[in-house]
Image (cartoon, rainbow, N blue to C red):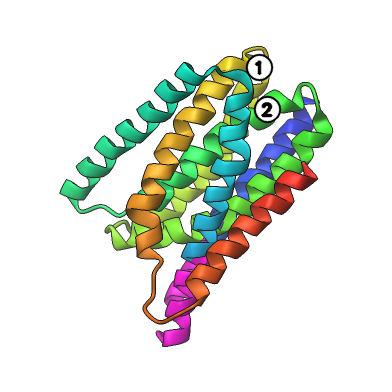
Amino acid sequence: MITELILYSGFAGITVICGGLLANLFNHHVKDSPVKYEVIHGLMSFGAGIILSALALVLIPKGMEELELFPIIISFSAGAIIFLLIDQNLDKKGGQTATLLAMMMDFVPESIALGAVFAVDPNTATLLAVFIGLQNLPEAFNSYRDLTLSGFTIKKTLLILLGLSFFGIIAALIGHFYFSKSPKLTAHLMTFASGGILYLLIRDIIPESKLENKFLPSLGACLGFLIGIIGEKLI
């Protein structure tokens, strides 16, 4: 059973490094052109749509199933405020890591949830692993771009993404052994993450994905959200 959980969470996480490698290939081996920038911004919006779908269809609903109104308000507000402070600190340092933070804010809680769900419903956990893996690919693609623009070397950026790939397995095991019997704690974690994700989306990610007089970014966001709907219906 544990071997299966490691395989599922490993699949969900391996798309992080795959997205980074794809971004490296695209950024450094494809000539600059208007089409290239449209694709980049389209993928940014696609990732934003998937992140938003994770928030709206997985994290918030699962949190609301377990928590009363006041705990939801506290956890969600805490997530938003803490990531506002983190974002302000990064702004002072000139960093561009919003997409990476947003990816971690949904990848880690969902991986913990994957481990917790696997203990009681392996079939749902399998579909959740696929859903998380689909999310991680465009998010990692955009995170690679953000990190390299912030001054990280290609090697360091890929090592960060590789580490995150394996961290999903650790998070799933933590969820399986420690959170499967604490649904309220898992719900608090998901709601906290939702506040941080929504702040980062509105503050940093969505404005960065805009291209003047172009439709592809908006369409990409819709497609990303649609994939989230499909994943949720399958689950």
Q: Position of residue 204 (x, y in %)?
A: 34, 54
Measure how far apart labels 1 and 2 are at the Cα level.
8 Å
The residue located at (62%, 42%) in the rendering is: 57
The amino acid on which the numbered mark 2 sits, given as a three-letter code, is Gly
Q: Along the horizontal axis of the image, is 72 left or right of 230?
A: left
Q: Position of residue 154 (x, y in %)?
A: 39, 61
Q: Quadrant of residue 83?
A: top left
| Residue 95 lies in the magenta stretch | no
The amino acid on which the numbered mark 1 sits, given as a three-letter code, is Phe
Q: Which residues are magenta?
A: 20-43
| Residue 23 lies in the magenta stretch | yes
The rendered magenta stretch, by its main secondary structure, is classed as: helix
Count all numbered tags in the image, as a single digit.
2
* Contact, mark 1 vs mark 2 (Cβ under 8 Å): yes
Q: Which mark is residue 115?
A: 2
Q: Quadrant of residue 33?
A: bottom left
Q: Which residue is mark 1?
A: 177
Element type at marker 1? helix
Outermost residue on the top side: it is 181
Q: Position of residue 98 (x, y in %)?
A: 36, 50
Q: Along the horizontal axis of the image, is 204 left or right of 171?
A: left
Is 87 above or below relative to 26?
above
Judging depth in this view, the residue of 30 and 203 nearest the camera is 203
